Amino acid sequence: MLLSKFFLLLLGVTVPAFFLVPVKWRAGVLLAASYVFCAYVEPRAAVILAAITAVTGFMAAYTEQLQDRGCVKKAGRITFAAVCGLTFLLVVYKYTGYLAGRFGLTDRIPECVLKNLMMPAGLSFYSFQAIGYLVDVYKHRIAAERSFCHLACYLAFFPKFVSGPIERGEALLPQMKRLGEVRFWNRGRLSAAFTYMLWGYFMKLVVADRLGWMVRPLFAEPEVFDSFWLLLGVMMYSIQIYCDFAGYSYIATGCAKLFGIELQENFRAPYRAANMQEFWRRWHISLSGWLRDYIYIPLGGNRKGKFRKNLNILIVFLVCGAWHGAGLHFLVWGLLHGVYLIAGSFTGQRIRSRILTFWLAGFAWIFFRAESLEGAFRYIRQMATAGLWPGRMRQAAESLQLNGAEIGIGVSGIFIVWLADWLCDREKMELPLLIQQKTNGKRYLVFYLLLITIFVFGIYGAGYHTEQFIYMRF
């Protein structure tokens, strides 16, 4: 959705409106834009979001009042009930359609009911935010937000609505209260926002969507390809999902900066990790941090012995898999990462290899990308047993729409992303911020090159429907 004409139009209207209205109305402008965006993506999602926001606000305020009166146990029960309710709602929306299809009940449930029980846009992300907010209020980490507008904007803020990052109340709510301090003309902030957005669009349109073209037929019909192409498919999808999701995060961060709002860093060169523990400190940082603070640590973390620690890791990653999607293949994906981390704990994380880490993550991505558990095993079986078919190399390349130009653009895009990650990892700073440190001439040259590259080599335009961001499905 961040690639649509509607989003760019909405952004173009919201930015001037935000700075032209009296400062006390700025949060209202962002809230209105967020709900317009939500309703455009999916009308019923706006209704569900509003209901969850109202319930979350009431429960948090009520919990705080109970604690102030000394009714701590009752406040705990109310918080627990609210968290269970949000979790139940998420499970119902995420799994009803899947279970109905799995057990052959689709024909027995009215189509209108199934349609209304389909996963609403953004629910996975803002429900986790709501749960975190309720727990933080109960734990006295933050005070219950008295302004419904600020709370609603925290949950619905449109740049991050469909795919995060999963923001904490203690980080984002204070920024909502300081919107009046933001000045339009701040060249450093505007330049950084523009750079974040350009880099995100480059990762998405030039790299991720081009790789998506090639990956799709490999996973649709793995029997048509030999082991070489299927191994290449694992590598391409690993890079595709990274550039797709990180690209979204960069665009969302850039959009937020236009309004003076700082979103948390969500990726930190994850494929430069030397083991799987480090990978999860760099990949979808907002989710991994949420799972650590709201599931792993409450379960006991590593404080109750090695067995409980390993069990807690498995539980966390099973939840992680279930959160990503309905299906056994997502559970296996999560379980694999749990096993990776447990195996790493037995070796004391002494085995450090970026190549091994990349391929371990890549193998797990097979289960994530496949349409089912059976499809994942079909892909793996063909990859392991097909061998090489030199005589059909050209035919396979043609079926993937590969030619010299496409190969050159694809390899160049991957190299640029790798080089940027290497540089960012070395300097411990995101690329857009590194670019801001350069002289005006060098910075404008980067802007120009990125713009030209996106317009010339990006996948968009008439006859092509830009790929939906992968994480919009979750």
Image (tube, rainbow, N blue to C red):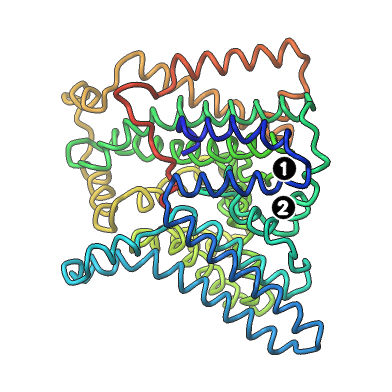
**Which residue corresponds to the image point at 59% horizontal and 47% vertical from the top-left?**
32
> Badges 2 and 1: C-beta atoms under 8 Å apart?
yes
**Which residue corresponds to the image point at 62% horizontal and 51% vertical from the top-left?**
285
* Closer to us: 91 or 47: 47
Number of residues whose C-alpha sits closer than 10 Å to that of mark 1, classed few (under 14), some (14–19) or many (20 or more): some
Q: Disc 1 marks which amino acid?
A: Ile
Q: Disc 2 marks which amino acid?
A: Leu
Measure the C-alpha gap from mark 2 to mark 1.
8 Å
Residue 261 is tagged as 1
Q: Estimate the x, y position of residue 180 in percent, counting from the top left.
A: 80, 43
* Closer to us: 151 or 385: 151
* Quadrant (top left/top right/bottom left/bottom right) for the C terminus: bottom left
Where 162 sits versus 89, above or below?
A: above
**Which residue corresponds to the image point at 65% horizontal and 54% vertical from the top-left?**
154
* Horizontal side of residue 298 vs 141, given as left or right: left
Q: Which residue is mark 2?
A: 172
